[in-house]
Amino acid sequence: MLHRRILYRDAHAHIFEISKAKGEFLYDPSGKKYIDFTAGWNVANLGWNHPEVTEALRAQLDKGTGVAMWHSCDIQSQFAEALTAALPSGLTCCIRSTGGTEAMEVAIKVARTVTDRPCVIGFKKAYHGQLFASMALGAPEDVQKPFAPLVPNIEQWEYPLTQDDLAAFLTRLETRLAQQDVAALVTEGGVVTGHGSALVPAQGYLSQTQDLLRKHGTLLILDEVGTGFSRTGGALFASQREGIVPDILVLAKAIANGSGTLSTAVLREPYAAKAAAKANLISTFGWNPLAAAAALKTLEIHRRERTWDMADAKGKVAFDFLRDLEKKGLVRAVRGHGLEIGVQIPEGATYDHVELKARANGLIVKGNRTEFFQIMPPLTISHESLRAGPAIFADALKG
């Protein structure tokens, strides 16, 4: 719909205009305060407008706000060094880009160029971005249809959710990889964040999949756009929780805590020379200095405060409340990790009703627009808001 000369995909009732944001709160033009259970879909993991990140932006304003893509600048180099130091060993080469979609498209380009193979495997119901290759990886057929054909040689498989699923998946994958034409498999780490359902794979999925990929020279691209920066608890990145090191790691969203547009695909060093020579790594606004300053400070805060521990502790509180709703029949399923929680509403409940009633009572919550809501507040959320938000959500479900 058209709202104030901007086109939105949402109906008018779902357009929510904010005047300011602070911590876990959003404010509308009338001054009414809302608890934000979305964090901009895993963007403001440290809370909106974090004062230290804002101060880092102010300091960078005096040094420079832009740099051409064929130049380098100190703040970019500082962030690359700090980020790779925080990542699992072996991920040492950063590619500059602006958002998750761009970083994923870059990762696919790199995988095809360094392996000299055309095919890529993704999963149904996964979300990896809004361009032609990233949508081919996981977007449903009805979403793809209006602008098909998408990028060829990209396959969508079913995500293995049970141990039986996993056994069948690994058998099929071994057969498929033996054809020696698959450049990469693209997956999220530990939980699917993109469409609100928070699917959790079978235990051992990532490690066993990576073993097969390495056996056949196929790369593992791990999409941590949603799961990165403490969101799933246990560690700074989901790859660390899962105990694996991907060949390409894609990061965005919470990387600058909503204070700049920045993303990256981080490679293992053996792929760097071929990627630089063949993958056409160009991004006009990739790693804008202001965004890089915000990202550097954001990373510092996560590591200093061990924000992943907040995700564990507060996630347990939220899970306990929501599972009590499940026992009472107010929701059908609750799953996820940390503060990345998918909640399936009961049959007969209307998604729009729940979202709009929750908003009317002071809670912003979003999901897949049909039957799932995703609970993903800032990890710094106060205990008071962590108690109040689920209570408002439960009241909306009762309606």
Image: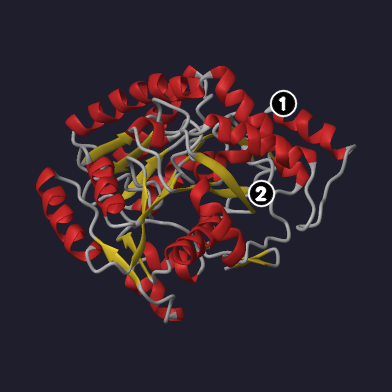
Quadrant where the C terminus is found in the figure: top left
> Image quadrant of residue 127?
bottom left
The percent position of residue 10, horizontal first and vertical second, equals: 51, 62
The percent position of residue 206, horizontal first and vertical second, equals: 28, 43
> Image quadrant of residue 305?
top right
Tag 2 secondary structure: loop
The three-letter code of the residue at mark 2 reads: Thr
User: In this view of the protein, which residue sits in the foreground, 193 or 94?
Assistant: 94
Nearest-to-viewer mark from 2 and 1? 2
Q: Residue at x 57, y 56 (%)?
A: 273
Tag 1 secondary structure: helix
Q: Work out whether 69 lies above or below 201.
A: below
Q: Residue at x 43, y 77 (%)?
A: 150
Q: Residue furthest left?
A: 164
Relative to 140, is 85 on the left or the right?
Answer: right
User: In this view of the protein, which residue sits in the foreground, 153 or 90?
Assistant: 90
Q: Which mark is residue 51?
A: 1
Q: Work out whether 84 lies above or below 314.
A: below
Relative to 156, is 246 on the left or the right?
Answer: right
Of callouts 2 and 1, which one flags the residue occurring earlier in the amino acid sequence?
A: 1
Q: Which mark is residue 354?
A: none
The three-letter code of the residue at mark 1 reads: Pro
Q: Residue at x 58, y 45 (%)?
A: 93
Q: Is residue 359 visible?
A: yes
The percent position of residue 358, horizontal first and vertical second, equals: 44, 40
The residue tagged 2 is 261
Q: Work out whether 389 lies above or below 68.
A: above
User: In this view of the protein, which residue sits in the foreground, 274 or 138?
Assistant: 274
